[in-house]
Amino acid sequence: MEWSTACLDWEGRLRAGRSIIPPPLFPAEAESGLAVFKELRIVDAPGSPTIGTACAHWVFEFAGCVFGAYDSDSGRRLIREFMLCIPKKNSKSTIAAGIMMTALLRNWRLSAEFIILAPTKEVADNSFKPAMDMVNHDDELKELLHVQPHLRTITHLSTGATLKVVAADSDTVGGKKAVGVLIDEAWLLGKNPKASDIIREATGGLLSRPEGFIIWLTTQSNEPPAGIFRARLRYARGVRDGRINDKQFLPVIYEFPASMIQSGEARRLENFHLVNPNIGYSVDRETLDRLFAQAQEDGEEEVRGFLAKHLNIEIGLALLSDRWAGAEYWEQQAALAGLTFEQLLERCEVIDVGIDGGGLDDLLGFAAVGRDRQTRQWLAWTHAWAHPSVLQRRKSEVTKFQDFSQDGDLTLVEAIGDDVREVAEFVARIEAAGLLDKVGLDPSGIGALLDALAEVEIPEEKIIGISQGWKLNGAIKTTERKLAEGALVHGGQPMMAWCCGNARVVPAGNAIYITKQASGLAKIDPLMALFNAISLLSLNPQAQSGLDNYLADGFFGLIGSNS
């Protein structure tokens, strides 16, 4: 039997109001599952209607795909993993409770375990209550199932199978042999550095249960996606778009095409229904419009929160009320996607370097900003290093650091000193290419950097101390203007988008400054390194005379592939 879970025409389907959910592989199984699913009651809705009378058709399509992926002849489920990413208030809790209750009722395996894995105790309680209510308000189910609210467990009295709602705790899920696992609010799990281990424990039993399944059920994150959620969302998009061939994974993602987000169409009220399939059911159009109007009055921070939660638009920058003005233009200047260090050397006639941070509680930020010899645009490439102590001191940011490391934008060093040596090597490569103008450093705490730069024979006259605080105001303003006018471009590194979103502005008379103290626990070291580099490049340095020899000697064939 051949099938595909890709949906290559999903953009056109959404625009035309057509379904992005494929038909079930086994229609008879789908109908048998839906017959049970539709009879369950939504107790907290007016009149406590059944799912079959109160839900939109797309709900039955998705549930039917889950039920209809099971081949009763072989006892195997041919599609074993599902992801539904959908805005708030689109019946997510109903779907979670209904699918898992149906799985419990139709299960044939004795003492089978079904789990709803929630990121927090509060979400676990919210996930359990609809399932409990479905039992308590149905006389037939009360005879068949036993509810234990204090354990968040429902037990099938005939098979001994259980449906249990648990908070994401490795001690709780360890050793489980689940047949079905529904992961609720996966975006919150993305903030948990132990999420991968927890999910591995919860889903380990599927290896010996061919009828088993995993369902990822989530809204979009209200900040840049991180950790296991970021990884799974990327994977789901890859399957949907045909880049990844995995016919056992079915992605259903209600999100706007990138073209509609960039053009502003996604912010038009008449298009909200495209990603809210439950409009007219659990989503009230007038309330949605009013919430958007309120968010617009409250500023860009609230608008982005609305876009993430109610329109499923992924946030790249956390633009808060005291944000750095340049952050508003950062994403649109990612004109050189995937820009590498080698490409920077190839394109630029002169490069200035900025370095910042490096303490045990900091990232060590590196920025190389060069002037393109053809376009005269400023091109920026950044990197950062983190000492293992940062991972211990900043546990809330561990998943982000791990993501940036996988992107290749952050190096997790093993020993103190490795970071400054690698920084010096980057500077040495720029110097050897005949492109280095100056290196700008924060004057405080630069001893180890000076030693490392001396070891690679960077001339002392090329190392400049850059005054910080309000004295960096000129570089900050220059960066803002260059971004706004399109003269500063970069490679769209997620790490830098995060740093820009972290930056907080403090007024100082007629000037402003950005400090690590004002930005709190969030890291901005690579951004401060960028300001240091731009303070030097704004002095309009001349191209180095060694450039022609550099090109003629074929230096690019000799340098490494670090990027």
Image (spheres, rainbow, N blue to C red):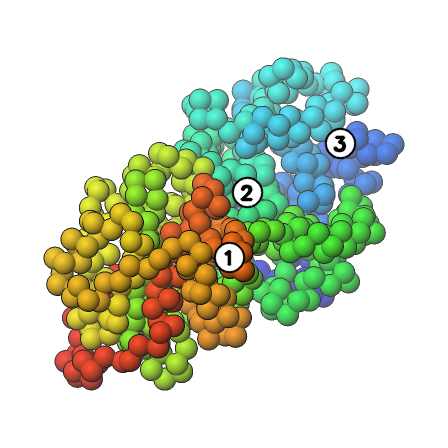
Q: Indicate whether 114 appears above or below 259.
A: above
For the C terminus, the image quarter is bottom left
- Tell me the amino acid under the disc marked 3: Leu
> Distance of mark 3 from mark 1, alpha carbons?
59 Å
Depth check: give the residue in front, 179 or 122: 122
Q: Where is 324 relative to 162, above or below? A: below
Per the model, the C-alpha gap separating discs 1 and 2 is 35 Å
Residue at x-position 43% and y-position 47%:
516
Residue corresponding to mark 2: 187
Q: Earlier in the sequence, mark 1 or mark 2?
A: 2
How far across and down, in percent of the image, does residue 202 sit? 47, 30
Q: Which amino acid does the dot numbered 2 rest on?
A: Trp
Tell me which residue sits at (61%, 51%) in the image: 321
Residue marked by disc 3: 40
**Between discs 3 and 1, the one toward the N terminus:** 3
Q: Earlier in the sequence, mark 2 or mark 3?
A: 3
Pick whichever, 261 or 448, lies toward us.
Answer: 448
Q: Is residue 54 left or right of residue 251?
A: right
* Residue beneath disc 1: 512
User: Tag 1's secondary structure?
Assistant: strand
In the image, which is nearer the foreground, mark 2 or mark 3? 2
* Residue 546 in view, yes or no: yes
- How far apart marks 2 and 3 lie (CA) works out to 27 Å
Task: Report the number of numbered marks.
Answer: 3
Q: Secondary structure at mark 3?
A: loop
Q: Which residue type does callout 1 highlight?
A: Ile
Which residue lies at the image location 38% right of the left edge and 51% below the top edge?
A: 525
